[in-house]
Image (spheres, coloured by chain):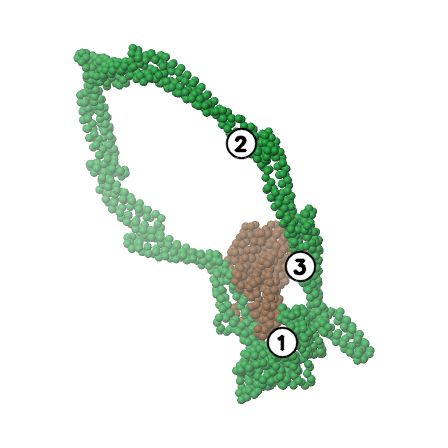
Amino acid sequence: MRLNRLDLIRYGRFKDAEIVFPRPVEGVPDVTVIFGPNEAGKSTAYHAFLELLFGFKGGAHPYAFKFERSDLLVGAELDLPGRGTMALHRNSKRTQSLLDAQDRPINEAILSGALHGLSRETYEERFSLNEKGLREGGERIAGAQGDLGQLLHAGLSGLTGMAQTLDALAERADKFHKKRGRGNILKTGSDRLKEIGRELRADRLTTERERTLRHDRDRAAAEFEGVDAELRQTHQRQAASKAAEVWYDRTEEIGQLTEALVDFPEGPNLHPGAAERVAGLVEKIAAQTIRIAEAEEEIDKQDQVVADNPVDKLAQTLTAELERLDQLTIDGASLMGRANTARADLARRREDQEKLSRQIDAVLRLLQVPDAPASTVALEAGVLEDLAAAVQDFLTASFSNDAAREAAGAARAQQGEAPAEPQDMTALRAAFDLWKTVADLTAFETDQSQALARLTKVTAGLPASWKELIAEGLPARETLDEVGRNWMALTADLASARNDLDARAADLAEARAHLCAQEAAPDAVDIVVTEETRRRRDMVWRQHRDDLTTETADHFEKAMYADDGTRAHYLIGAEARQRLLAAQGQVRTADARYGAAKTRHDDLVTLRDRLSERSSRLALALGLGEDATPSAFSARQQALTAAAEAAAELSNAKEALKARLAHQEVARDALIDAARPLGLDRANGDLPAQVQRALTLEDSDRKAWAKWQEGEKTIDKLDSKSAECQTDCETAQVNLDQLTAALPLPDRSLEAIRAALPHLRSLQQLYGEHRKLSARIEALEQAIAALAEGAQRLARIVDDPQDETGIDPVQVIDRARARVVGSTRADEKRVEAVLRRDETDRSKRRAETELQAAIDDLNGCFEGQGGQDLLPRDRVAKLVERDRLRANKATADRDRQKARDGVDADLFAEELDRMPDATRAAELELALKDVQDSRDTARDAQREAARLYRDAFEAADRSDLATEQATLLEELRSGARQAAVARLGVLAARGALRRLAEERRSGMLRDVEEAFVTMTTPAWTGVDVWSQAEGEKLVGIQSDGSTVPIEQMSTGTMGQLYFALRLAGYRSFARDPGPLPMILDDIMETFDDTRARAALQLCAEIGTNGQAILFTHHAHLVELARDSIKGVTVVNMPD
Amino acid sequence: MMRLLVSADIHLGSPIRSVALRNPDLGDRLKQASRDTFAEIIDLAISEQVDALVLAGDIFDNGYPDLKARAFLISQLARASEAGVPTVLIRGNHDALLDHKAHGDLGPNVHVLHKGTPTVEVGGTAFHGLSFDAAHVAKSFLPDYPRPVPGKRNVGLMHTSLDGAQGHDPYAPCAERDLMAYGYDLWCLGHIHAPFERVDGPVLAVMPGIPQPRHFGERNGGTVTIVSVGEGTPEFERRAIGHLGFSECALDLSACADQQEVLRSLRDTLMSAQVPGSDMAVRLHVTSDRHGTELVTELAVEVLDSIDGVFLDKVKSAPPPRKPGAETDDLVRLMQDELTEDGFRQAALQQLEELRLALPSEIMDELDESGLDALLEEAIAEVSLTLHAGALR
């Protein structure tokens, strides 16, 4: 392949630019130097060339800044092996982007065949080199350590990272696993797997583990049962030993007790408490004997008291008489109590009576009735009080009567003449009040002016026809909102639909283009076409066979090639046909989607038109233009609504003012009518003012009239009061007269009675006291007489003649009373003595009975017992001791029998045979402790085994471990595969590199050496190959004959060696399969002139084998090229 | 009409085997996947109020023998029983733990069919089944199955590999046509983990599939089947179940111009694997001449950080097929030549064996000698991809 011309039609900053690569004359190397300063577009041209060859890359395009990506277009004229010169274009489409000169899609195979199937990346790797690649390539081949295979591969492929690749693969494998390595993935993973395995095995309850656990549990239970039985046996033996010991001890004790009982009296055991009972009975017998003796002595003593106090036969008579005297009273008190004082008191009372009689006489004289009996003048206390009240009432009534009469006179004197009665102004006041409510129009006039101003303001921005618009009716707010919303939604939907439609159209176009491309692809031919070409070939063949001319031969050749090509394409075109089918499907899908999008778009347009029509109607209804958008509706609707409201308010204000004026007129007429009867007239001036004045005066007149009327009422009330007081006075007079009518007073007037009242009160008091005193004196005299009579009867009873003489009744009575008292005391002593004697006698008999009972009980206690010769106390003590010994013996027998209860008989017999044995108990205790310890151990073991068995089922599920295990195994599986792949890859690569060295060394090594020496002479004179165990190694030979390993060369030398390798690789490729343009981008800018000249010569060498294109921005390199390369073409970058 | 929930191959305790579970959240969610899935089956049986739960073997897994799993099974079946759902089941080749002689019964309303009790009647339907203890059975069970009960609907439970299934050992092989002609109305099958149904006239055979796939090879599972048995052919309905699915995605990175485009393509591809409400482990087959497995794995992990519910199971990267007539890379060509050398194969086998022997025994099969050719093919591709990737970098 050769590039003749590169067309930068629309690419980067270029438009319709071209770079021509003239074909050199025969014998001249094909080298073109493209010269341009920095930013002249050399990289742009390089990329354009690559995109022409391999198509545009996807994604954002770095050179689509002047032209859209879809408009980018590059072209070239190429010499293609077997096809001759072809002009090609390349656009940025994904498919069918390679076009002929007429912009018709052509098959990519045309180019890919010429490029020997290389991909863009491979081409770049092999057929391009820049300064950076040269420098880095030189450094990287050092990693090959001179490995010939790697170096030659680098030269052939342009890939310099072989050493690093192999190292990376080996490292990857080692990272996973390295023999005897530590910390690698496999080792770490395996260790973890072992841990997991251990944990899982410990955790997993397998059948075997369950069986083992169950067996352990059962075995532990059995062991426990055995030891537990042994423990029970030991317990039994210990119990038997203890029982035997008890038996032995108690038997000994019983023998001793039997022996002791021989010396004690016979007889049954005493009853419980018998000793205490005997002691009590002995005590009781002694006590009762003493009590009997004491009782007999007391009986004798009481008989003597009875004899000393005989019965008084007069005592009863005297007692009755004295009781009669005691029942006599004077002034509510016993006569006997007052008998001594009554005689002295009588004389003093009589003196007091005389004194009161004198005072009564004095009072009667003051009342001017000295001769009147006091009883006729002295009033009862109630009558006297009534009289005093009547006097007081009469006086009060007289005073009230006088005061009322005086008050009435004073009121009448103050009342004066009556004023004129005021006129009725109720109607006038009502009319005036009505007038006042409507008299003021200011508020209405203000409202009207404000409404007018508001209307003017809100209609300022409205058209003149606003009133008509309002009158015709405004659209509803909801309607406008709905239209607005719909309009916005529809606009958005429409924009979306439009975008969607564009996108679908683009997709459809692209799908169609893709389909065209697929259809145009030669591989996509179907069987019909192959048959057609075959038919065409056969027809041309027949024609050629007939004619056998050059022209028919050409036709046949052409038809034959066409048929061969078609069939070849058909044979390899299964995939292309699949793509074609897929492309057809994509077109159908895209077409359907486009149709759907179009339908949606059209539907939305229709909807929009309908909505637009509705919107226009609404706009007109709002006074807007037909094409006004709904967004303006809301504001206009609000303005018109405000205007309507303002107009309505103005109209309302006017109506209100008008109504108020009408009301005012009516009120004025009513006021005139009401004022006229009162003499008020408009002719006399402002009528409301006159009415206001009249109403104001009417108030004061009415107040004066009311006050006078109130005075008249007060006078009437005072007169009425005076009359009532007169009546009361007269009533009091009558009452007083009635009360004084019986009094024998010479003057019974008010004043006389009022003056006599204190005397009457004194008389009433003195007369009362006199009467009381007279009655008391009479009672005293009667009492003294009764006392004397009683004394005489007492004297007669006792037959005392002195008493008859009546010396002193009191003394007689006292003696009688003393005799009665003495008789009474003697009776009491006598009765008490009799009672005591009887009691003592009863007590004596009880003691005798108890004594006998005690003696009987005592005999009963000892019934059947021996020891009769002993005193009861000693006898019972002996018997009690006997019984205690007997009880001890029985207890010992019970104890030994009880000790045997529940004890194994054999063991007991064995243990009893051992008795006495002082160490046996300790020996058994030790044995028991040992067995107890064994049993506790067995019990713990049993519980632990049971717990382990239970826990095994209840343990938490460890699926996490199993999951981690599985995941880790998968990781290791994957890692192992990758490690194996890496290892085998390294193995295969190293083998392949050895083969490469063998295969290419003869062809390339000479070229490498020649190129290297050309560039490095005279420092280096050649290269050599060392055969080593690990393979052949390339070394450099210096002018002194010494060899230098590559890794020890300088960076510049290594770069030159790398360049030499690439040149050799190019030459090898050019030889087979064929040359391709080699792009060198300023690779010599760091070379000195000598080396640059040498490198240019090597470029010429490339040009000899193929085509070399050298980009540079160094003018001196251009000159060097002109000097170094014969016939070199220098082309400037286009503008 | 009788409704049955049919399941099989629960493999209680057997974990999911995927590198995807290295994700801590996913690993935590799925650590009890088999148990959770079985509990979900019980929930479904209860909520659907089926007349019986049918389990056609392999409730347990021989690789994970644990009587705790048996205790779990008993508790779950008791839950179903308390809700009025009886269970009929047979043992599979993994069900040593179901041996009632060794371990006792599973509880009330749970019927394990075996040679001693091959038939049980539940809800007027006769269920027939046989259980064998051996892990490998070469002969068909079918001749030993009871004859259908006249006048009843007859349902058979069988654990069988049928005529053979890829990836499954032959177990109680049985010709499908013999099965369908046996006279039962419904066959509930187990052993083959991929679900399928066969209808032959009035007879339906159901292989419900493994309810929770454990690895990529079981990606077709994740189902149970609800069968309605009435007049005519029984009707079936598959129900998705399980907590993790596996899927396969192909991705061609050949046309990607740069790393951003690679990441975008990866993202689009992995996003397409998302399944609402379920976690997915993705196996990625990448075509690229520049991006090796390791590189793509790194990039995919990075991309998946921002994608919910999708996890990386494995990446396989391979170069695109060579264009006809394309110039072969010398290195690739010579490596392929190298593979034909006996000496090379010997060395390769030696290296492989050395690595294989270092592996845990469970995964030694991965590097079996029989897989050498495939490994070498991958190795050549990997060298080429890594070399070009180095140039790309």
Residue A556's disc number:
none
For label 3, the residue is A495
Looking at the picture, does residue A197 appear above or below residue A243?
Answer: below
Q: Indicate which disc, 2 or 1, sits on the residue closer to the N terminus.
A: 1
Which quarter shows the C terminus of chain A?
Answer: bottom right
- Tell me residue B12's x, y (percent): 54, 59
Chain letter of the residue carrying label 3: A
Q: Which residue is mark 1?
A: A40
Q: Amino acid at mark 2?
A: Leu
Q: Quadrant of residue A918?
A: bottom left
Q: Position of residue A403 (x, y in %)?
A: 41, 22
* Chain coloured brown in the rendered structure: B
Which callout, 2 or 3, points to the residue nearer the camera?
2
Residue A697 - label: 2
Q: Nearer the viewer, mark 2 or mark 1?
A: 2
> Is label 1 or label 3 in front?
1
Q: Residues within 10 Å of mark 2 (few under 14, many from 20)?
A: few
- Asked if disc 1 and disc 3 are in contact, CB closer than 8 Å, the reply is no
